[in-house]
Image: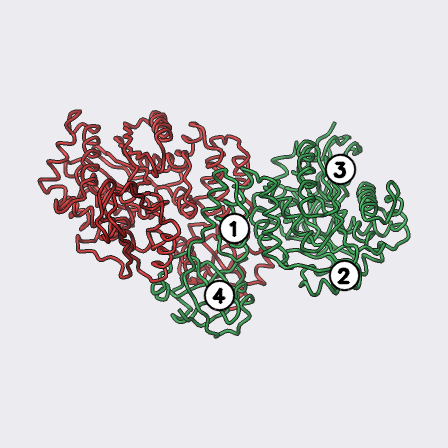
Chain colours: A red, B green
Amino acid sequence: MRLKLKNFKFLAGKPVCMIHKDTAKELGLHLGDRVSIKGKNRKIISIGDIISGTSNKNEIAVSGEIFSYLKLKKGSIVDVELAPTPHSIELIRKKLNGFRLKENEIKEIIKDISNNALRESEIAFFISGVYENEMSLEETKNLVNAIVKTGGRLKLRGKVVDKHCIGGVAGNRTTPIIVSICAATGLIIPKTSSRAITSAAGTADVIETLAKVDFSVNDIKKIIKKTNSCFVWGGALGLAPADDKIIRIERAIKIDSTAQLVASILSKKISVDSEYILIDIPYGKSAKVNKNQAEKLKSRFLDLSGKFDLKLKVVLTDGSEPIGNGIGPVLEMRDVIKVLKRTDSPKDLEERSLMLSGRLLELAGKARKGEGEQLAKKILDSGKAFKKFEQIIKVQEGEVKKLVVGKYSYSVRVKKKRRIKHINNKLINSLARFAGCPDDKKAGIYLYKKKNQTLKKSEKIFTIYAESKEKLEHAKKFYNKNKKYVVEFY
Amino acid sequence: MRLKLKNFKFLAGKPVCMIHKDTAKELGLHLGDRVSIKGKNRKIISIGDIISGTSNKNEIAVSGEIFSYLKLKKGSIVDVELAPTPHSIELIRKKLNGFRLKENEIKEIIKDISNNALRESEIAFFISGVYENEMSLEETKNLVNAIVKTGGRLKLRGKVVDKHCIGGVAGNRTTPIIVSICAATGLIIPKTSSRAITSAAGTADVIETLAKVDFSVNDIKKIIKKTNSCFVWGGALGLAPADDKIIRIERAIKIDSTAQLVASILSKKISVDSEYILIDIPYGKSAKVNKNQAEKLKSRFLDLSGKFDLKLKVVLTDGSEPIGNGIGPVLEMRDVIKVLKRTDSPKDLEERSLMLSGRLLELAGKARKGEGEQLAKKILDSGKAFKKFEQIIKVQEGEVKKLVVGKYSYSVRVKKKRRIKHINNKLINSLARFAGCPDDKKAGIYLYKKKNQTLKKSEKIFTIYAESKEKLEHAKKFYNKNKKYVVEFY
C-alpha cells in the first residue's frame, strides 16, 4: 500500500510508525504487528501503532528514527506492507530450549535484530536463551561473525592496537589514560566504547562530559589520521548495530552472558581492524567475576582469538574494590584528568593505568618484555600523554575544561572512628545509577577514602551527587536499605 | 511537574506518553524512562517517548490506553514525575540466575507487571527466568495468589463449575459445547477464556466471530444471571491483568512454562469463584506435552488444588492429531455449531465434548459415576444445549449466523491416492497463524480428511483461507518449506 510519509518528530528509541485505523484494517494490521516501510532506496521494519486522530488515512506517521533512516522528504510516497513474523523467533525458542544454534541460524537472528524485525521482548528472549544455556565456542565464533557482518567496518593502516576491560569495577576509568599513552608512542588505537551496561558509566559516557562521541565512520578516519586515536561511542558508528541493541536491552536487567560479552568485545575489535588486543579482566569480591570465571573467560578469549588471527593478551587484575575516587561520568573524568595532569592523582587509578599501558606497549613491540610500564610512566611524566589527550578531545569538538557535579548532594559520614574493610562495587554502582548515572552525567559518588584507610569521627565516607531531587531521593532510599553492605568496616 | 493532558488518539498496545524535549530535559527524562502520571484519582506508569513537534512544552500527549485509564477530560492537569527503576528488576535477575523467589518477591514482580512499571523486555526476562528455572510448588502457589490479588474478582452464587484445556491440539474447540451442555443442566459455568497463545485460536477468538467477548465484571454478572454462563475474554475483565500481559508477550515466542501455565489457569478459576474444575490435558505426538509431561502437569495441578481447596479433576486425553475439521476462529465456530445443531458434526469433536461434559457433570454431582456422558448426550440430542448456546450468544449481543471464510484461499491436493498417517498439530497451527490466525478471524485451515483416512488422486487435503493476499503468501511459503511434515502419509 502506498502512503504519504509524515515525520512525527518524536523519538521512541526504536522505529515506530502510526497508521490510521481504517488504513490498518485495509492492510490487515493489528496493534504491534511488524510493518515494512520501503522508500526510494532504503527499507525499514518497524512496529505499528494505530492512530485515529491527527493523521490522515493516506499517511503513515513515523518516529524520528525511521524518518532519518529513510532519508526522504516529508510527503514522499512510501510502500507500506505487513512484514511477516520472522522465522528467527523459532530459532530463539530453540536457544531458550537449550539447543545449539547453527551458523546460518545465528546469522538470521542477528540480521533480524539489526534490521528491527524483532521486538524488544523477543530480543530479551534471545538474551535470556544465551544467558541461561550459554554458547559453545563455535556458536560464539558465529555470533562474532554475524555481528561483524551486519555492521560497518573501519579499514585502517599502521599497527592497530586496542584494549578492553570487561568492567564491573566502579570508577576504574583507565581507558582514556592508556589510549593517550599508547597513541603518544605512534600506535594506532581506534577506541570505540560502549555506554554503561551494569555500571555507573562506560568510557563513552565519561568522554562525553568533554567532547562529542558520536561520529560517522568517515569522521573517525579523519580523527585517527590526525591523532592516531579516538574516543568514540561504538553505538553511533553502526559497526555492530545488533550488539548495540542487545546491550541496550540487557542494560536494564544488568545481565551479561559470557558468549555475549566476548562476542560483543571481539566483534568491535575486528570491525575496527585491531590486531594487538589487551583484555583486562578484573576479578574478586564484588567484581563482575570471581577468579574461576575470570580464568574461564580468559580461555574463551584466547580460544576465540585463535579463530580470528588476533594477537590477544588477557590480564587478570584485582577487581575487588573500586578504583579512583569518582564514580559517574563527570566524577570519573575528573580523576582521569588528575592522572594525566600529574596533579593529585588517585594512586590506584594511576598504577593500574600504567601497568596496563605497559603490557599493551610490550604486546605491540614498543617495549621489551618487563620494560613497558617504565616506558608508559616516562610518557605520562613527560606530559605527552596529556597533550595527546587534549588533542583528541579537541579534534572531537570538545575541550578539557573544569567540570561541575550535580547540584543536589548528600554526604554519608561515620559516627565514630572506623577503618574501611570493603567497598562493594556492585552496590556503589547501583547507588550511582539510582542517583541518575550513566545518563545524568553530573550524577555519581565521590569516595573520600578506600579500603584499609581510617576515617575520623564524623568524617565523610562519600558524597552522592544528583541532577534532580527525585533521583537523589531514590539513591538515598537505596543507600538506607543497603547501608550495611555498601561500605563495610573492620 | 504539572502538565496538561492531551489525548493523542493512538493505541500502542501499552501505555505510552510523549513529552516535549525541553520538558523532558527539565524533568531529567531520557528516552524510554518510566514516567508516572497522576490524575485526580488514578495513577499510571508509562514509558516516555520524546517529541519535538506537534506538542507544547506544557503538555503531555498520551496514548489511548492512558487516556481511558485516567478517566479525565483532555486539558486536565496531571502530575508527571520520573518513576524510579523498580526493585522487581533485581528480583527478575534473581530468578534468571536460578534462585527461588519468596512470596513478597513474587508479589512485587506481579504488582509491577500489572501496573506497567516493567517494560515488555523486562517482562520477557521474567518469563524466561521462570521458563528456564521452573518454579517450585510454593512459588507457583504464591504466583497464583499474586495474580489473583492484583486483579478483580467475581462473586457468584450457586454451584460454580469450570473446565479448562491446556491447548495445543489444533481445532479442538470443545469449550462452547461443554459449557452449553452444563449450563443447560443448571450448573453455573462462568467461562472466561484467553486468546490464543501458541495456537490458531483461543475460545475467546472463536466466540468473537458471533458475539462480543469483552465485558465488565458487572456485565458478566448479568449475563450469568440470565444464562447460568458466559463466554468472555478474561483479558478485558481485569481479573488477572498481570497474567494477561505475560500471555501477550510470550504469545510471540510461543513458550509457556509449567508454573506459568498452571498459575494462569488456576488464578482465573479462583477469580471467578469456581469450585468444581475439570482440566483437560491432551498429550501425544505433536501435542503441547508428551505423556510424561502430562503426568507431571497433572500432579502439579492436583498438588496446587489442595492448597486452594478446589475440587479439581484432571483428564489426560489423546492430543496427537487435530480435532474437528476447521482450524481458525470462523472455521472452528462452524464446527461447533454443527455439533450443537446435530447436523454433519465432526465426530471426533462431538465425542471429545461429550466425554468431557460427562466428567464435569459427574464431578459436580449432576450424574453418577459412569453416567455423565449419557446425560450429556441426552442434553445435546434434545436441542437444549444448542438453545442454551443461542441464548448466551444473544445475551452477549450476538447472533448465531452463517459465517464466511477469508476470500483468499489455496488448496493443497494429493498427486496420487494416499492414506494420512499424521497431521502435525504444531505445524498446522503455525500454518494457520501465518495465514493470519488468530487476529484475522476468517483465516485458517479446513481439513478434509484426518488420520487413517484415504484421499483419492487429486483430492484436496486441506484449504488455507486468509483475509489478505500477503498473509496467504506467507502461509504458502511456510507450507512449501515444511510440506513433508505438515501432513504425513503412509
Find disc 4 in the rendering and name its residue: B62
Residue A363 position, x and y percent, is 22, 28
Secondary structure under tag 3 reads strand
* Contact? badges 1 and 3 (CB < 8 Å): no
Find disc 2 in the rendering and name its residue: B224
Q: Is residue B340 left or right of residue A187?
A: right
Q: Is residue B126 left or right of residue B174?
A: left
Q: Amino acid at mark 3?
A: Thr
Find disc 3 in the rendering and name its residue: B317
Mark 1 or mark 3, which has the lower sequence index?
1
**Label 2 Cα neighbours within 10 Å, binned few <14 / some 14-19 / many ≥20:** many
Secondary structure under tag 2 reads helix
Q: Amino acid at mark 1?
A: Ile
Say which residue appears at 20% left-offset and 33% top-offset: A355
| Quadrant location of the N terminus of chain B in the rendered image | bottom left
Q: Mark 1 and mark 2: span between their CA atoms?
A: 33 Å
Q: Chain of mark 3?
A: B
Label total for image: 4
- B44 over B471 or under it: above or below: below
Q: Amino acid at mark 2?
A: Ile
Find disc 1 in the rendering and name its residue: B109
Closer to us: mark 1 or mark 3?
1
| Quadrant location of the C terminus of chain B in the rendered image | top right
Q: Mark 2 and mark 4: span between their CA atoms?
A: 36 Å
